[in-house]
Image (cartoon, rainbow, N blue to C red):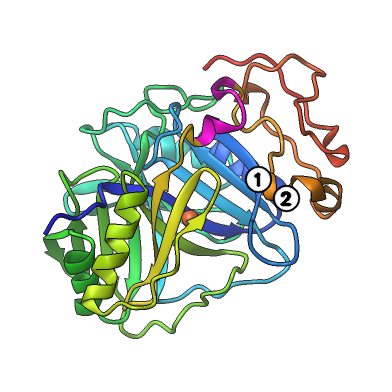
């Protein structure tokens, strides 16, 4: 069978307050903030913030809902950690860098022969930087995180499951992954050519209580796989239906991509996403991505009401080459403290 999934598209998690989230991804992980928008579901406005590598490529895009209204509970049936690739030899920099930012970490560990560091977002979300010399994608860089050590994009995600076999079957039979390794409690699944942005690791934790599935601070919400286009979404929905995974959602318009969602047997929500025409640059220039609050056309008439529900935020000066004091189009009244100056990309 031909399968449409080519690797990861994005990972989405619920953070706490917006500003510590922005500071963590742009200053600690050193990603580029590429979009300020809102969660499209529900009655209340929450930010939806996007971070990526230099080219805003699928497979590098971390997205968060700052969601301090409700706390999530970590556990099994959830993404346990999201893994970024970094160049081989850079982990000593990362240890120092995390220490400088007082970020809790677990030191250098090894899994499937690759060294990594696990560390914590302020809300308790877990991330890793993993050495992978084969990843040639272009990382973003910042005053603290230079090009030679920056994150390139995702390697993959670690999923916590109480049983491994049915989640493995889901990824293999429904999405075209291959089992390429087993090491103690870990099972490695890879899709297409495998490696960076094409890897899922199952962590067998039979005794771990179920984590929450709600939008809740400190818990990941879903992992999204990249598919080429809308036809591929329909094809993937057909594969789910044929196999009996009949709880796949309808195709949803996420403005920057179109998506279907299906919960895997281990409990983790898996999205398939097809980038829309223009991608993240469809509503703002590529060199100014992330510099102002953007709403999809169907929410634009409610902008004032939405902005009133959002906390003011500030994005880093190096995020984009916008002149000092220039309010980007669409910047709401609560966002006047945001300043942007020319930055080296
Ligand atoms: Fe998503």
* As drawn, 231 above or below 334: below
Tell me how far mark 1 sits from mark 2, CA to CA. Answer: 6 Å
Quick check: marks 1 and 2 in contact, CB under 8 Å?
yes
| Quarter of the figure that contains the N terminus | bottom left
Q: Could you say which is closer to the camera, residue 20 or residue 296?
A: 296
Task: Give the residue at x 64% y 57%.
Answer: 40
* Closer to us: 39 or 14: 39
Q: Residues within 10 Å of mark 1 (few under 14, many from 20)?
A: some
Q: Is residue 104 magenta?
A: no
Residue range corresponding to the magenta coloring: 280-287
Q: Which residue is drawn at 13% across and 59% down?
A: 178
Residue 296: numbered disc: 1
Percent coordinates x, y for residue 292 in the rendering: 71, 33
Q: Residues within 10 Å of mark 2 (few under 14, many from 20)?
A: few
The residue depicted at 28 percent of the width and 70 percent of the height is: 240
Task: Give how far across and how far down residue 337 sits, in percent.
Answer: 84, 32
| Residue 57 in the image: above or below residue 64 | above
Whether 205 is drawn above or below 14: the answer is: below
Query: Measured from the top left, where is residue 18 in percent x and y?
Result: 69, 49
Q: Mark 2 points at which residue?
A: 299
Name the residue: 40% across, 58% down.
223
Main SS, magenta region, reads helix
Q: Can residue 226 be seen in this view?
A: no
């Amino acid at each position: 069978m031909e399968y449409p999934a080519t690797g990861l598209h994005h990972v989405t998690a619920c953070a706490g307050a917006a500003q510590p989230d922005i500071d963590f991804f742009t200053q600690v992980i050193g990603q580029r903030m590429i979009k300020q928008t809102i969660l499209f579901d529900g009655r209340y406005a929450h930010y939806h913030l996007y971070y990526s590598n230099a080219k805003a490529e699928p497979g590098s895009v971390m997205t968060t809902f700052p969601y301090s209204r409700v706390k999530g509970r970590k556990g099994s049936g959830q993404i346990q950690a999201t893994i970024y690739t970094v160049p081989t030899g850079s982990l000593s920099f990362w240890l120092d860098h995390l220490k400088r930012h007082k970020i809790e970490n677990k030191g250098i560990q090894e899994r499937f022969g690759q060294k990594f560091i696990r560390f914590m977002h302020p809300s308790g979300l877990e991330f890793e930087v993993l050495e992978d010399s084969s990843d040639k994608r272009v990382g973003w860089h910042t005053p603290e995180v230079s090009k030679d050590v920056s994150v390139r994009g995702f390697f993959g995600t670690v999923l916590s499951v109480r049983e491994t076999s049915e989640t493995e079957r889901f990824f293999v039979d429904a999405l075209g992954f291959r089992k390429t390794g087993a090491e103690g409690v870990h099972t490695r699944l890879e899709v297409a050519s495998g490696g960076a942005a094409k890897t899922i690791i199952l962590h067998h934790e039979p005794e771990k209580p179920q984590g929450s599935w709600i939008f809740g601070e400190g818990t990941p919400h879903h992992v999204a796989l990249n598919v080429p286009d809308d036809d591929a979404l329909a094809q993937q929905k057909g594969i789910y239906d044929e196999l009996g995974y009949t709880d796949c959602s309808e195709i949803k318009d996420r403005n920057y991509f179109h998506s279907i969602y299906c919960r895997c047997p281990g409990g983790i929500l898996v999205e398939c996403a097809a980038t829309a025409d223009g991608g993240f640059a469809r509503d703002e220039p590529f060199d100014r991505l992330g510099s102002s609050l953007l709403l999809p056309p169907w929410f634009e008439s409610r902008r004032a009401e939405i902005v009133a529900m959002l906390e003011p935020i500030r994005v880093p000066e190096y995020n984009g080459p916008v002149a000092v004091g220039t309010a980007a189009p669409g910047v709401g009244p609560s966002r006047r403290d945001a300043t942007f100056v020319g930055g080296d990309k």
